[in-house]
Image (cartoon, coloured by chain):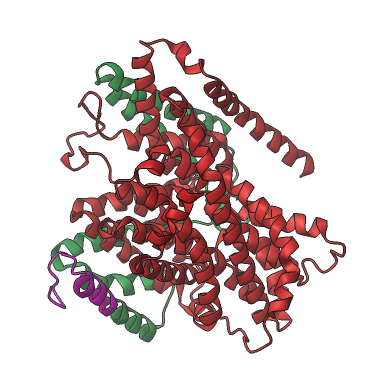
Chain colours: A green, B red
Amino acid sequence: MAIEPAEELVGNPVRPLERLAAALAVALAGGVVVWDGTRQAGASAYFPIAVGSAMIALSAVTVIRLDRKTRMTEEAPLLRGFAGLAMLAAFIGLAGYIGFLSASVAFIPAMAVLGGDRNIVRIAVGTVAFVILAYVVFNLAFAQPFPAELILGG
Amino acid sequence: MMDVLSGLPHALVVDSLLAMVVGTAAGILVGAIPGLTATLAMALLLPFTYTMSPLVALGMMAGIYNGSMYGGAIPAILMRIPGTPSAVATTFDGYPLAQAGRAKYALHVALVSSTAGSIISALALMIIAPPLVSLALQFGPTEYFWVAVFGLASVSLLLAGAPAKGLASAMIGVAVGLVGMDMMTGSERLVFGVRHVAGGIDLAVMLTGLFAVPPALAMLASPAGGSSRADLTAVGLRLGEAFTFVRTWIRSGVIGVVIGIMPGAGGNLAGIVSYSEAKRAAKDASLFGKGDPRGIAASECANNADNASSLIPTLALGVPGNSVAALMMGAMLIQGLNPGPALFSQHADVVYGFMWQMLLTAFMMLALGLVGAKLFVNMLRIPAALLAPMILIICSLGTYASTNAMADVWLMLGFGVLGYVLARTGYPIAPIVLGAILGPMAESSFRQALLISRGDPLSFVSSPISIVLVLAILALPLMQLRSRKKDTTSG
């Protein structure tokens, strides 16, 4: 989603340093693409070198045009967003050992609390209902092979 | 015409009908929840389509696409929160009508107008796509190279606030498309010893990560739970009254179809332009913004008329013009179907069947919207903070189910991080997907053209079609400059 100047839109702030870091990361990724392209022979090298160079050049343009204003975005706030991603990483890591549904029992309440929901009964009912529904749909109806579950078997 | 008719029986088989009903209901539900969009629903569905037949997968997606556009009108009317970005203009008159105790009437106007828009759009798809295919049959590698470049440049330049960021997103997508084995020489590119990606990056994994993870994270910052308790007992729209909107539907339908065909434009633009035109054309425009049903009719008809028409360049040329079209194309590629002229001759049953599905789901939306109004309104009460982790779990389950590899679930998370960071810093996401789809097409066409012409660069501008495409590409930055200048002058 596009970001707009702070005075025109409410939302979550994006500071210039974050925008600079993103532009530099794109340039770095472009550098890696160019480097890989130089290892290729003949026509295999054309596109990686052209694409990587374009990424570097476009990042340079972005950096030059960077202003000092704090912009607003509709995306999740930085800390909460990365906390959510860290929880998702923990969920995926856990799912490999105890199964997706078992890991969901901890993941749903943790994320709901991160999202500001403090209604314990609603969270508990929602978690149990979702796990049962997911078990019926994926394990029973679709008979999908998933990593073994600590709870609910499968 | 007979070709188009031949697709109808394929769309009417039981599996396809069931898929359309489920997709349409899911689409309305998704659209009714602010923060959830058709793109997110399709991204969630995509990994599960591996095991479906083509017309089941596409029927479900057609239902989601049409249904979600109407669903977006529900919170727009009841809470002044557009359920999808396309429903922004619906809030202008929908909410005042609901406040005046006419919520049921406003929802009915939105429903029949959405249906009218979807019908107009599906007919446009059936009428315009086949002749465009005849033109596309004259394309060689050179023309396809320019078509891919045009698709990338137009969407990147038109979608981004900053052109450099739009183009950078497209280049990131092209780089993702380069990962894996070069089909012409067999050499590995951007693999770095990770064997799992040596065969290339799975499109469904990328789409799920990019389009489902960032919106789910954004929901964590949404207000917890809606509070709509709309009164739906009042009088709705009578059949005779519906026909008073025919003129608005025709005008808005045409606007929606034209905007849908244009790459980079979307349902929100169609809704707003159509609303402005309806207001301009009205003899008495004094009620617009205060609860004029023509405002709802214009916005809802146009944002649905944008749907099927946006698939015209996707089906005929293999060039998706927006993120939903890219997801549709992803679903086709998963099924082994390559959108473009060859699809119409090799898989006519699927392509024409899909066109009928776009039409049939319009009628299903009407029926489901009338029957399930209360259920859809209650969806507004689901707390966003509880819904977000459920979406992320379905993403993970779907990704795992599609490939049976935990590595792909991690890759999905990686694309989620990429999408979140880029979206936060103003890089549009849709060009990444387009880059990943059109990049390989551009590269193979480019190299084929060079081989055929024995390295002659002038071969790229030797045909009239190529020259027209090059001129169109050159005109894009000029168009953007002009529109920026206009904005500066008016602002």
Quadrant of residue B400 within the rendered picture: bottom left
Percent x, y for residue B110? 64, 70
- Residue toward you, B96 or B48: B48
Percent x, y for residue A110? 32, 71
Q: Is residue B197 left or right of residue B297?
A: left
Query: In this picture, is A122 found above or below B1?
Result: below
Quadrant housing the C terminus of chain B: top right
Name of the residue lying farthest toward the bottom: B233
- Residue toward you, B55 or B477: B55
- Residue toward you, B428 or B343: B343
Residue at (41, 10) in percent of width and height: B456
Quadrant of residue A127 within the rendered picture: bottom left
Circle count = 0
Residue A70 is at least partly visible in this image: no
Percent x, y for residue A132? 26, 79
Residue range of the region highlighted in magenta in the rendering? A131-154
Residue at (45, 76) in percent of width and height: B383
Residue B446 is at least partly visible in this image: yes
Residue at (76, 59) in percent of width and height: B278
Residue at (16, 39) in percent of width and height: B195
Query: In this picture, is B130 found above or below A142?
Result: above
Q: Is residue B164 left or right of residue B179?
A: right
